[in-house]
Image (cartoon, rainbow, N blue to C red):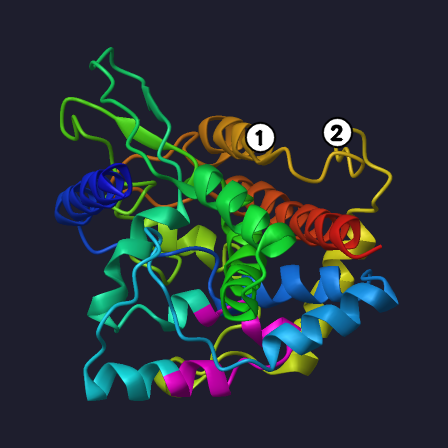
Amino acid sequence: MQRIRLFRTTMALGVACLILWMPSISLGWGAGGHMMVAKVAFDRLSPHAKTEVAKLLAIKVKVKLPDGTQPTLSAKSKGLLAAATAKSKDFVNAAHWPDDLRPITELDPFKPLHFIDTAFSDDGTALPTLPTPDIVTELNRDVDILKNSTDDNARAEALRFIIHFVGDVHQPLHCATRVSSANPQGDRGGNLVTIKGVGPKNLHSYWDGGLSTFPPGGPNFAPPSLAAVAAAAKKAVAANPDTAPGLNLNDPTNFQSWADESFKLAKDVAYKGIKSGSTPSTAYRTNGAKVANQRVAWGGYRLAALLNSIWP
């Protein structure tokens, strides 16, 4: 029991430090991108998987923190959680549920789990230590819960995070941070890189929206319509068939390899030619949009393969 308490205390301190260390950040593809990933996946789920996810998504989740403890929520936070869950009962809308929890401060320990900031430097600045836990460790934990837990509430929570985190780990700027003399701790996946002339004010947000090609949300952070998401997902799938080499759909839990792919794309595409204050070129926007839509399609294919491996 003492070991468990020590683990929880250590993890809580580590997560608290990560939260204090981070500035305000974007937390993944926007709702449109996450919903596209989920739509691609849902259309490929086995009948058994569709039945099981429907059962779990019908549960009103009582959220437990990553260390297994039950947070004490204020009345306001309880209302926010109930509202977030009520608007995400179907598989596609469940994809944005973890981001809908952002206003609930008692759930802040989840925030560092949306990314893995693998560092690189173009100017020789020493690289900081990679903080943990991260999205790869959390995906492994959530899959273990989904497969092996007898607690349906825990499994329902894990499923919602899996749907979301598989999307996040395919976003290149969720798997990299550029270190420099100006940002010795990294630029937070492009959150500290300002850009001009494209709408979003920082590089990370620009990529969250698929370089302005994903369906936009509505007023008051409303997600895009299912019809708009379906059309965008269909287009992404048509341009990126599941026969591409490297997809490795027979290995649906190799989360580190997905993060490594995203890291390479961040270096080779997302950051290429971009400095803070610059305007992305037409060629950059065209190539970046292709990469963003490919990552959404691949994320959907892999999410389906993962869930079908659990529920064949």
Q: Which of marks 1 and 2 is nearer the N terminus?
A: 2
Residue 196 can be seen, yes or no: no
Residue for point 74% across, 52% down = 310
Magenta residues, start to end: 82-97
Eyeballing the image, is 293 above or below 81? above
Tally of numbered discs: 2
Q: How crowded is mark 1: few (under 14 residues within 10 Å), some or many (20 or more)?
A: some
List the residue tagged with mark 1.
261
Quarter of the view holding residue 47 = bottom right
Q: How crowded is mark 2: few (under 14 residues within 10 Å), some or many (20 or more)?
A: few
Quarter of the view holding residue 125 = top left
Q: Where is residue 110 in the image (x, y as percent from the top left)?
A: 33, 56
Proximity of marks 1 and 2: CB atoms separated by less than 8 Å: yes
**Amino acid bearing label 1:** Glu
Left or right for 178, reference 264: left
Quarter of the picture containing the C terminus is bottom right
Q: Position of residue 142 (x, y in %)?
A: 52, 51
